[in-house]
Image: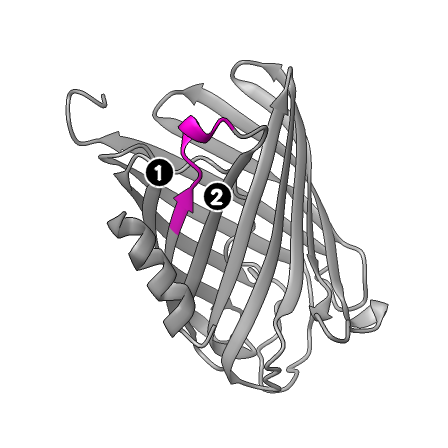
Amino acid sequence: MKPLFVFLFCILFIDSSSQENYEIQVYGSPTMTKGQTMFELHSNYTSNGNTDLMNGILPSNHSVHETIEITHGITENFELGFYLFTNYTPNYGWKIIGSHLRPRIAAPEKWNLPVGLSLSAEIGWQKQAYAPETFSMELRPIIDKTIGKFYFCLNPTLGFAFSGNDINRTPAFAPNIKTSVAASPKFSLGIEYYGDLGPLNQFEKLPQQNHAIFAVADLYLDPKWEVNLGPGFGLTDASDKLVLKLIVGRRISWSRKHA
């Protein structure tokens, strides 16, 4: 029960943001196996993005986002993740711009739910020049289901901003959706959707909302490695028009039992 209390503490006592281009990922419901650690590198390049300095935020055009993610399985259904965000923007150089912590708990298998279900809370800070929210939290329910060769996943994320520009006390709604089909046990093709509609009590007008579609491939060539890659296309004026992403993950077991 201790992981549950830690998780609830994070939600209740952090006065409760969207992923932007640092971690472009729709999360599945399973947590990391107890005693295992996943090391991931999120590499995202904005080929066609915003070229203007807006509200003190640097332009995204031709910027490179490199994020290190380390996730460790603490129990059979509780994990803790850590992120370190870095950014390269032309004329501004390469910078470490923030970090996040992400506790996540999943519904135990003994509940026999018809879908996979978990809940994560990602909390952290970013530098003012790179994000409108300098200290923020996202609460991410995760619901997924595999039917034959088809996989479906929904992350109806809520973002909470505590400091930064234009802070709105109402959480923002940022849904993420993924569907994919397994072409083989080691390869699947899919579509990922990322949205940010704005505050729940008053969504932004459509041109100011963020909507993007990614065409992705998932590779499972080795049980220790995972790869997700593909191009993303912005659908609104506020969205970056073309983003290329690559996620490479390496799983490490610290005991012979889990290996």
Image coords of residue 184 (percent x, y): 58, 13
Point 44% across, 71% down: residue: 93
207 versus 25 height, above or below: below
**Which residue range is magenta in the image?**
104-112
Residue 234: % across, % down: 75, 56
- Magenta stretch holds residue 65: no
Q: In which quarter of the image is the C terminus?
A: top left
Label 1 neighbour load within 10 Å: few <14, some 14-19, many 20+: many
Q: Which residue is drawn at 75% across and 57% down?
A: 211
- CA gap, disc 1 and disc 2: 9 Å
Question: Seen in the image, is 177 located left or right of residue 234?
Answer: left
Quickly name the residue at label 2: 118
Which of the two labelled residues, at mark 1 and mark 2, occupies the earlier sequence position?
1
Check contact, mark 1 vs mark 2: CB within 8 A. yes
Q: Where is residue 65 in the image (x, y as percent from the top left)?
A: 49, 58
Name the spot of residue 142 as percent of width and height, x first. Answer: 55, 45
Q: Nearer the viewer, residue 169 or 23?
A: 169
Mark 2 neighbour class, 10 Å CA radius: few under 14, some 14 to 19, many 20 or more: many
Choose top left, top right, bottom left or bottom right for residue 157.
bottom right
The way the protein has been coloured in the rendering is: one colour
Q: Which of 82 and 10 is in front in this view?
A: 10
Is 111 in the magenta? yes
Residue for point 37% across, 52% down: 68
Residue 249 shows up from this direction: yes
Nearer to the camera, 155 or 213: 155
Front-most of 248 and 13? Answer: 13
Query: Residue 173 appears in which quarter of the rendering?
Result: bottom right
Give SS at disc 1. Answer: loop
Q: Can residue 97 be seen in this view?
A: no
Say which mark, if any, is on residue 77: 1
Count of residue discs: 2
Q: Looking at the picture, does residue 112 appear above or below residue 249?
A: above
